[in-house]
Image: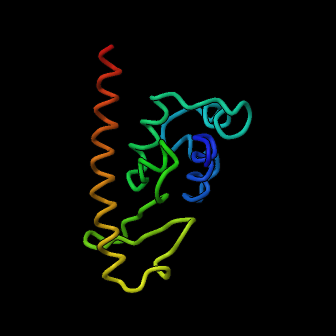
Amino acid sequence: MTTINERVGILIKALKLNKNSFSIKIGVDSTVIHNIVGGRLTKPSFEVLEKILLSNDNVNLEWFILGKGDQIFKETSATKKEYSSVAESPADYRDKNEVMKELERLRTENEVLYKAFRELGKGKKKQ
């Protein structure tokens, strides 16, 4: 099982960015990202997690927050989604229909998790 710090590092590499360009992409100071994945290994705040997820809508929320499930989905067109993961590839499935069904199931699950995450953020801001 990976830590949240390791998952941030995996995400940065998967996006083919470095710590500085990633920090610019999500809108935080580069030292924040360095402290999460490099130096101090501090845990990211809720605000940083929110910025990461809102800036990267193709990230599987369950994987990113809990370390469970598949890593990343990337949209290749408006109607077609392509699976991308460190753990496995579409070649591991028997046919394209099976891949597409699994992608749709995971996309739906991801949407539910994003909504729940945003609701958690709204509750925290009110406190």
User: From the viewer's perspective, is residue 76 above or below residue 53?
Assistant: below
Q: List the single residue furthest toward the right.
A: 39
61 left or right of 86?
A: left
Q: Horizontal placement of 80 versus 55: left or right? A: left
Q: How is the image coloured?
A: rainbow
- Please identify the quarter of the rendering in which residue 95 is found: bottom left
Q: Nearer the viewer, residue 55 or 84?
A: 84
Image location of residue 94, percent across then percent down: 41, 85
Picture layout, residue 23 above or below residue 57: above
Report the residue at 27% width, 47% height from top. Answer: 112
The residue positioned 35% from the left and 83% from the top of the image is 96
Q: Residue furthest top?
A: 127
94, 11: nearer the viewer: 94
Quarter of the figure with the C terminus:
top left
Residue at (27% x, 57% y) in the render: 108
Q: Position of residue 61 (x, y in %)?
A: 41, 47
Q: Which residue sits furthest bottom?
A: 95
Q: Going by the image, does 126 lie left or right of 64?
A: left
Q: Is residue 11 placed above or below 99 in the rendered structure? A: above
The residue lying at 45 percent from left, 29 percent from top is: 47
Looking at the picture, tell me which residue is in the foreground, 35 or 119.
119
Horizontal and vertical percent for residue 85? 51, 65
Side of 82 where 12 appears, left or right: right
Residue 113 percent location from the top left of the image: 33, 45
